[in-house]
Image (cartoon, helix red, strand yellow):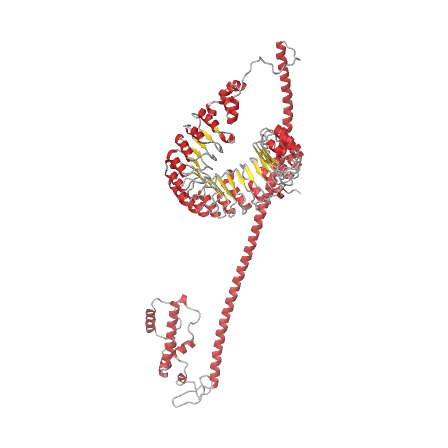
Amino acid sequence: MATMAASMKGQTPELKRYLRSNKLPDIYEALLTGLAVMCPGDPLQFILDKLRCLKENGIDELNWDMFVEEHMRPPNKIITESNLDFIFNLDDESMIDYIDIPVNIQRGQGYFGGRFEGITKNRTIWPTPEMYATAYGHYNMSLKNMCFSAWMQYYLHKKKKKQAMEKKMNRAALHHAHRILRVHLNVWRDWLRYRKGCQAMAYHKLKRIYFVSVGIVLFREWRAVAKRNKDQREYFEISLRRLERGENVDDEETFGQGDGDAQDKLSGQLGIELAVKVFSFLDIADLARCACVCRSWKVIAYHSSLWNRLDFSKVRNRVTDTVTTKLLSKCRPYLIHLSMRGCSQLHSSTFMAVSECRNLQDLNLSECKGLDDESLKLVVKGCKIILYLNLSHTHITDASLRTISKYCHNVQFLSLGYCKKFSDRGLQYLSAGKCSKKLEYLDLSGCLQITPDGFKSLSHGCTMLQTLILNEFPTLNDDCMIAIAAKCTKIHTLSILGSPLLTDETFKRLANNRHLRKLRVEGNQRMSDLSLKAIGKNCTDLEHLYLADCQRLTDVSLKAIANCTKLVVCNIADVVQITNTGVQNLAEGSCAGSLRELNLTNCIRVGDMAMFNIRKFKNMVYLSVCFCEHISEKSGIELLGQLHALVSLDISGCNCSDEGLSSLGKYNNHLRDVTLSECADITDLGLQKFTQQCKDIERLDLSHCKLLTDGAIKNLAFCCRYLTSLNLAGCKLITNLSIQYLSGVCHHLHTLDISGCIIITDKALKYLRKGCKKLKYLTMLYCKGITKHAAMKMMRHVPALKYSDDEIPIYYGYK
């Protein structure tokens, strides 16, 4: 436009007058308006068409928007008159020189109402000041109108924008209020559900109390009547028989009179089959003693079914080559299972005798210090049908693995745990042998000398592996496990305790095989929720999950495994990020009906709501909530009594006192194993009520319950007569009287811990020797009242005894 205006600048007034008279600026305005609004695809053709239309219709009805369709016409002009005047230079002063004087201008009157001055011969007109003022006023008014219109449009735009913002803010405030109401509604709903559950539980408790009370009354009356009737019937029957024989009813029979012939009632009355069944529960030493009783017992003791299994580990400290060779020579045709675990005094003569047991299928040589490559070669050459072979904690080398791969074609179970002297080459021998395709179980725990190359060789040969144990393997990394996961696709049991270098990549690869049923991981700080998501998605047959001390796992992990319908065991001890939400996800998942064991030890964020949701696990047998400090007594511990299938419970370090313990035993009297360690508020009264309700307790841990006295142990001994394991460590008020009660009644006790019981003396050990004949494990640490001489004397009667008279440690909390 600037170029066009510059070209029109030098034109003559006659040309400009011609442009004005033929309305060329108006035609230009109409064409530009049409092009700007219509935006045609071919602008040149558009101009030609519109000019042709003007030629046909004329320019009399020319308007600025005549080339724009009706529905697209703008309300205001796009091109102002001032722009047209600037383009065609019509506001130049030269135009004024040639203005035609209208006919009505007479006697010197101006066009704008003023006077004309300086009219020349060529009719030149000079504008007067009035004309300038009028033109300026008109131009100023036009600018004001334009500014006012622009300001009005701006104001209306801001007003509309403000109204829209107010609407949005109102909607946001309404949404926020609804969201707050929804949150409060959910909290209220959870509270209402919890209160209804408590009310229902109270109703069931009262109902059960009522029916139990009525049943007790009826049973007592029925029992009394039945006993009286039975006594009367027996009395009359005995009296009638004596009268028929002509005897005096008042005479008493002499007990123990016989014909003088000794009889073997065991074999005579039970029969040989039942007698053999009884003898099958004895170990080797007891069988040898029984064989010396009489001839009939000797026949039973040497029955072939009793000698298909030999276990020398129970007499590991006394067994010698002479004894083993003699026994093996007698039972070698029948021997199938043989265990020499920990028998460090055996040498080549014993292994020669083992090699002659051709039917041997199960052989345990772990911790045999006399075993070397030559001895093992001798054994496997003779026992070619071995299926299970345990060589853990021995000094075998690569030569032994080469021997196994050469002669043991059917071995399925192989344990090489903590064998430090074989290398990757030994695994190459094993994977190249004929047994590699049948090997299903392999234990390489603690074999830190194995590198990723060894695992690659193992994975290429042993593709049928189903169980792999790699515990205490701190150098185990992703390269090792990825090689295993790529080839050994049938692994369903994996234990990698103490392997902190494994990441999510390993567990994703293992989960892709979809056969995983048992997974044990401990102390891994790189494992995250991503691993559990992959396992929960792919391994739907998962049954056993052990994830202790994996700190990066959260509630998302429990939600991921909640759909494993066959999950039986879940151990998430020391996973501190688990909260009530995670337990709720687990309880609402598909695994709620199958889960039998749950370990929440040190899950410090778990509280009462978790105990409320745990009630949904109807088949739960074992539960541990050790040191879960947010579990209260009334709203948490009492709810556990509703788990009627629960047999084992560990609430060590929880907020449990006499009331909670009494409620726990009142609603679940099927408990067998209970741990109450460090429950400092439990007194004699609470333990008395608990033992009176749960009389079938077999294992009880009362360590560091400092308020317990001899009265509590007295009630425990007389109520729980089948007690087998008892821990009283840290119970500083216990005296010799408690041990006297236990030894006098609890004859099945085989494990006892009285560490820190500083009042107990040597007299207590006399009670134990006299009453607890089955005692095998006795711990007496920090017992200053017991002398070393008495402890040494007690070692003759107890196989495993720990004793010390050191000072009480600070963590015992004694003042």
Furthest-top residue in this view: 246
Residue 773 position in % (x across, y down) = 59, 28
Residue 351 vs residue 410, the one in the foreground: 351
Residue 110 image-quadrant placement: bottom left
Residue 35 image-quadrant placement: bottom left
Residue at the (36%, 75%) spot, across then down: 59
Residue 745 against residue 452 in the figure, above or below = above
Residue 755 position in % (x across, y down) = 61, 37
Residue 255 position in % (x across, y down) = 62, 16
Residue 530 vs residue 374, the one in the foreground: 374
Residue 36 vs residue 50, the one in the foreground: 36
Residue 307 against residue 710 in the figure, above or below = above
Residue 15 against residue 401 in the figure, above or below = below
Residue 642 position in % (x across, y down) = 58, 37
One can see residue 282 in this view: no
Q: Is residue 549 left or right of residue 510?
A: right
Q: Which quadrant of the figure contains the C terminus?
A: top right
How many labels, in total? 0
Residue 248 vs residue 468, the one in the foreground: 468
Q: Is residue 733 left or right of residue 99?
A: right
One can see residue 472 in this view: yes
